[in-house]
Every structure is written in C-alpha cells, then in structure tokens.
Image (cartoon, grey):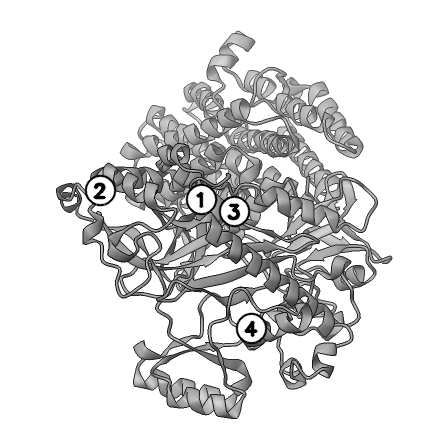
Amino acid sequence: MALKEQSRIATIDWKNYAPAPYYDELIGDGQKPRAGAEALTRHLARLGSRELAARRLAADLSIKSMGITFTVYSEAGMIDRAWPFDIVPRVIAESEWRRVEAGLEQRVTALNMFIQDLYGKQKVIADGVFPRSVLEQSVNFRPQCIGMKPRGGVWAHICGSDLVRDGSGQFYVLEDNLRVPSGVSYMLENRQASKRIFPEMFAQATILPVDDYPGELMETLCALSPGQSSTPNVVVLTPGIYNSAYFEHVWLASQMGAELVQGSDLYVSNDNRVFMRTIFGPQPVDVIYRRVDDMFLDPEVFNPDSMLGVPGLMRAWKAGHVAIANAPGAGVADDKVVYAYVPKLIRYYLDQDAIIPNVPTYLCMEPTQREHVLANLDKLVIKPANESGGYGMLIGPRASQRDRKRFARLITENPRNYIAQPTLNLSTCPTLVGGRMQPRHVDLRPFIISRKKPYVTMGGLTRVALRKGSLVVNSSQGGGSKDTWIVADEGGQS
Amino acid sequence: MLSRLANNLYWAGRYVERAENTARLMGVTTYLLLDLPRQTQFDWAPLVEITATEPLFRERNKEVTEQSVIEFLTLDCDNPGAVISSLAFARENLRVARDLVPREVWEEVNGLYHALRDLDGRSLERRSRQAIVERIVRSGRLVAGLLDSGMSRDASYRFFKLGESLERADMTTRILDVRSEDLLTTTMDGLRPFETIQWMSVLKSLSGYQMYRRHERTRVSAKGVLRFLLQNEDFPRAVLHCLDRFDEQLKRLPENGSCRRGVRVLRGKIQSAAIADLVDSGMSEFIDWIQGDLIELDQRLHATYFGR
C-alpha cells in the first residue's frame, strides 16, 4: 500500500464517509455517530489516519507474533495465514444488544427442544408443525441417537448464529451453526488486540468484557460430567493440525486447562468407558468437547474409514459414561430448511414470537415457492441446505447466466437441498483501507452456550468483507474480522 | 501428559540433536581436509556411513565426491539422514506440541528449516560451507539454551531431554565407530604423523578438544580419545555422561523401572571396559554392542510411555 497516500490524508472527517445506501454500524443519518459510537468516532477523528496507520501496523505485527492464524487449503498445500484484522471496532449499544441476547437465548432454547423432540416422541411432526418428509431427507439426522436424552435436554451446547442487518438496521438471523461452530478464539484475540490499539477508549467508555467465555464453557462442560469427581477430566477432541480451526482448538484447550486430544489418544474399554493414553497409563475421560464432525466420531457407527474418531465412542455415550458436546446428531437443526421453520418452532415450543426474525426464506421443496425461485434466480441468493463456510452458494445478481442455469438444474434435481433468500443490503462498518475510512459489509457471529440459564457472548465475532462491495465475509474467502464492542449506555449502569 | 505428545517431544529432541551433530561432522571433516597432505586421497564415504544411508547415496550419486556427500547430507530432502530431513521431522513433531515448549524453540527450528530450504548446492562449496554449518550448530545450541532457561522441568521438558541425550550418545558412538575403524586399522603408510590430527578432528567435531586437553593431560591418542568420549562422566558429549543425563530425566518420570535398569546395565558395560585392550582389537564390536543397547533403551521408552 502506498505510504505516501497514507501520509497525505492526515485527518478523518466523517462528513466524507458515505456508506449510503447501506445501514452503517457507526455513522447514522446526517453523518452523526450512532448511539454508543460517539466516543469512538470522536477518538478516531482526533487520532487521524497517520496515527491509525501506525497503530494498524503495530496490530499486524502483534497478531503475527501472537501466532494467530487460520489454515487455508490450496493446490500448493496448507498455508497458515495470519488472521486479517481490521482495527476499527464495530459498536453496538448495550440496550440494543440485550434484546439480541434475549432473542438468541430464545432461539437456542427452542432449537434444543426441537432436537430432543426429533430424537424422542416427534410430537412436532405428529402435530403437523414440521413435515416428516423434511426429516426423512435430512443428511444430519442420526437414527443412532433416537431415544437419547442428554442432561437437561441440551443437544447443541455451543451454537454460533450468524446475524446480519438489512438497510433499515433490523437484525436478522441468517443461519444457526449447531455442529462445530468456530471463531470464538478470534473474538477474544481481537479484543486483546484492540486493547493494545485503543487503550484510551477502554478508559473513556464502558466496553463490556468478553473474556469470560473459556471459563463459562469449562464450567458448562464440567457440569455435564457423568462421573462423581468434582474435577472431571474434560478433553477437546480435534481432527488435528490440518483442520482449518486447529489454532482455535489449541487455544480453547489451553484457556480451559483441558487436554487437547486426537482420536488416536482415546480408546473405549469393553465396559464402554473412555480413556486417554498418557505416560501415566490410561486416564478416564468424563467430558468430550468435540470439534470433529458426527460422521467421523466413531468408525463403529458412522464413517467406517474415519481415522479421526474413536471406535466405540457412541457406545460409551449411549451408556451414559461420557458426555459429548455438542451431542452427536445435534446437527439435524443445522439445516437451512429447518432454519426456515425456526419462527414456527419458537411459537410451538415456547408459545412466543421470535424476537429476532429470520431472513425471508423460500423452500425449493415447496412447488409454488420453487417456481418463484426459478423465475427470480437473478435476484435471489441460493444456498445448499447443509454446507457451511460459504461454499456452494449462488449470488444471483452477480452470477453468470451459465451459473444460474446450473443452479436451476441443481434445484430441479434436488429441491429439498436448496433454499433461496433475497439479497440483503448487509450493513457496513468503517474499515481502514488504503489509509482512509471506507464502508465494508459486516455480519456478526455471537456464540451461545446452552444450559439451564444460557450464556451469550458479549457481542461476538464481527466478520468483514474486505473487498469493496463484497458480501462474502468468510475467512476462507478473503474476509477479515473486527472487534465488537458492546458499549454500556451513557448514564446507565455498567 | 498424553503418550502421543511425549513421543513427539522425544523425537523432536532427537532430531534437533541429530541435525546439529550431522552439521558438526561436516564442518570438522572439511577442516581436517585442509591439514592433510595434498596428494592424499581423502575418503568422504565414512560420512555417509555414519548416517547409515549408503544404499540411498549410491542410488543417487555415481561418485563419492566432497560436494556430492555434503549436498546429500545437508540438503537432500529424500535422504532421511540429511540435516534438512532431521529439521523437517523435528518441525513436524514440534508443530503439534507447539504450545508445550517455549515459542522461540518452534520459531528457531522453523526458521532454520526454511533457511536451508532456500539454499542450493553451490552455497555448500568449501568457502561458504562453514557459515552454514555454524548456523546449524548455533541453532541447536540456541534451542538447548531456550529450553534450559525458559522451560519448566515438566514432563514435556523431560521427554525432549531424553531424546536429546539418547541421540547425542548415539551420534558420539557413530562417529567413534566410523572414525576408529578408519584410523585404527589403516595406519596408512606415510600418514602416521597425521594420525594425531585425525583424532583431534574427532574431538573437535564434538567440541571436545579443549576439554580433552584439560581432562586427559596427555597427547591426543586413540586410547585417550576413546576413553574420554566413552567413559568421561563430566564431558557433555561423552557417552557415559549422556547416559547419566538420560537417567536424570527418567528418575522424575512414572514407572521408570525397566528403562532405568537398561541404563544401569549399559553404564556398567561402558565403565568397566578396558579401552587399552579394545584399541588393539574389538573396538568395533564393542561399539556395536553399545549401539544395540541404545536401541533397546529406545524400545523400552516406547513400551513404557508411548505405546500405552
């Protein structure tokens, strides 16, 4: 980047910052800062872009030296990339956040009840709320789990839900990740970085802390232990160093003081108990926080070729000798067709209206909706029901005629596997690009821990599409991230 | 501690040590060459023998030349005994155990590995070789220092050190084996005056010349050098000392019975050996015997700690 250009623009004038027609996270109508962002925008303007560039450089260096990386796959093999971080935080006023928090708690509560119901009496189907045909074609429904009742009826102990805002500023849930959601370590590392970059801000405003996550997670996991010990053995099960989230697995294990294990470190005894192999001999394992997908968990039951899993793990789990989080089979609710039913599920299980709405979603399996989708491929976003990481999508307005034709065929061949949503005008947030503030699209992934009283992270991971106009925030596809500040309302209690 | 990680650290310790020793050997051999009479046909093959990779070398090289041997031992990724391969293995083992050792250790090994990958054969020609050798040796010393001053004496540390001391004992015996065979049997006519400098080179490859002078107080001789490098309790690269260091770590680990018994037996054999007689005959067999015992120690470690 041209340093010259950076030094020429010394001041930041928010009057020249033009996010329109999008909703901007920091700057509102009449170029005024939004509630909660006053102090930050003032501070940024005062620092000026030369100072910001210097602080950004310092941030890049510290991220490199802290070794925060993620892994991308390419033809040339694996690359550990430094985590792209933008120093300008995204700010949400506490009063607004409390409502989102309540909405997320409501959502995961209903989702857990739904999962328990599907593996139990299936009343939701008998009552005609959820179609049996959708369940029958679900790739993440595990018949092996039928009849199981994990403690407290919680299946998805950790959920990462993606939120977006549209042009009006309304938050929507875009998807729920109930299998092995990742990103929480980056949320916490981003906070460390921004404390170093803007120490003054943490003195001026009450930015609610995020660092209690590992402690809360550990406590939740310990509480799942079927054993009697007050200090149960908790392990984090990773697929290994070649997994794109391996950095996070190492990070979480060390933050929680849990052992990081691979499948080969564990074995299941004939009496269905799980042990890990240590230099002191076999040690019993009580709780497994697994970051391995269902299908690879246990070659005895699922994919027989899996080298990542532990033969017999499902036996041990069903016998109640080990707790697994998230529970096998929880992914059944991590399906974009199920997603479309969530507002109905909230009404059915909790008798409440959804606090955070869904993005309007067309189910291609419904003939009339499918017709609408096929006729409007140039306006809609098409998503496969069970992919994550932003793969296998069609963004209609930007797609070529050929891609649209291909998706039309895919949808017709397998309508159950596709949903469509209108293209959203994702909100933007000021981002330091080429020495000046430019609007870039963002989303937000809060993490919710389910237990008697659910825990929601204070804010979450804000992901930002660093390319101008891009809507793709996934780190595997050129996205970066920002720190997310929940700022206590002025005059309110902190 | 997980058995898998203990195994990773043990091998990281072995490979880091192996890389350093291989580099030392090349460095000293290069210097030795400068002291020998010009008409001598110096044989580079023993270096390949020390790393036990002759078949592969012959497959890949028509001739045993200085350059072919040095390149093979430094940069040939297909040679498991090459410095670069040792570093690659060390790196793979450390990668998964990265959070168990001081971060600088990983950075040093990783950095050296990448530096060597960027080299080509020409940089190993005699005039620039020494700088590279020194860089490799210095990295090894740096890692040792980082562990010494920056790492808690936990199980991770102990397994790394177990690997390091066993490998060091093994490399010392390899060097003695090949060099003594050379030097004891072929008292090449006309090379008598140079025997001393060849034994000196053995000492120097193990940074032992200065210490030898102070401990042995005699001229450099076959008997003196062999006694020093096998039986000295105080010199860090002497086999006996390495065994004591190995045992020191074992003492602090659980269920060490079988491994410590193995150490005791081997220690007894070395300590009671009559070096003066062995110099005349049987040295090679004796060293084979030690190496066999070292392999058995490795197997006992695996059975006790890694295979559980």
Same-chain status of marks 4 and 3: no
Q: Are marks 3 and 2 in contact (CB under 8 Å)?
A: no
**Dot 3 alpha-carbon crowd within 10 angstroms: few under 14, some 14 to 19, many 20 or more:** some
- Kindly identify which numbered label has been placed on residue B92: 3
To which residue does mark 2 refer? Answer: A49
Task: Identify the amino acid type marked 2.
Answer: Ser
Residue A121 appears at what percent x and percent y?
A: 78, 75
What is the chain letter for disc 3?
Answer: B
- Labels 3 and 2 in the same subunit: no
Count of residue discs: 4
* Left or right of A214 on screen, residue A88: left
Q: What residue type is labelled 3?
A: Glu
The outermost residue toward the right is A271
- Amino acid type, label 1: Asp
The mark nearer the N terminus, 1 or 4, is 4
User: Quarter of the image containing the N terminus of chain B?
Assistant: top right
Which label lies toward us, 4 or 3?
A: 4
Q: How far apart are marks 2 and 4 (CA)?
A: 42 Å
| Residue B18 visible in the picture | yes
Q: Cα distance, mark 1 to mark 3?
A: 50 Å
Which element is circle 4 on?
helix
State the separation of the CA atoms marked 4 and 3.
42 Å
Q: Mark 1 points at which residue?
A: A489
Of residues A164 and A78, the one nearer the viewer is A164
Residue under label 4: A339
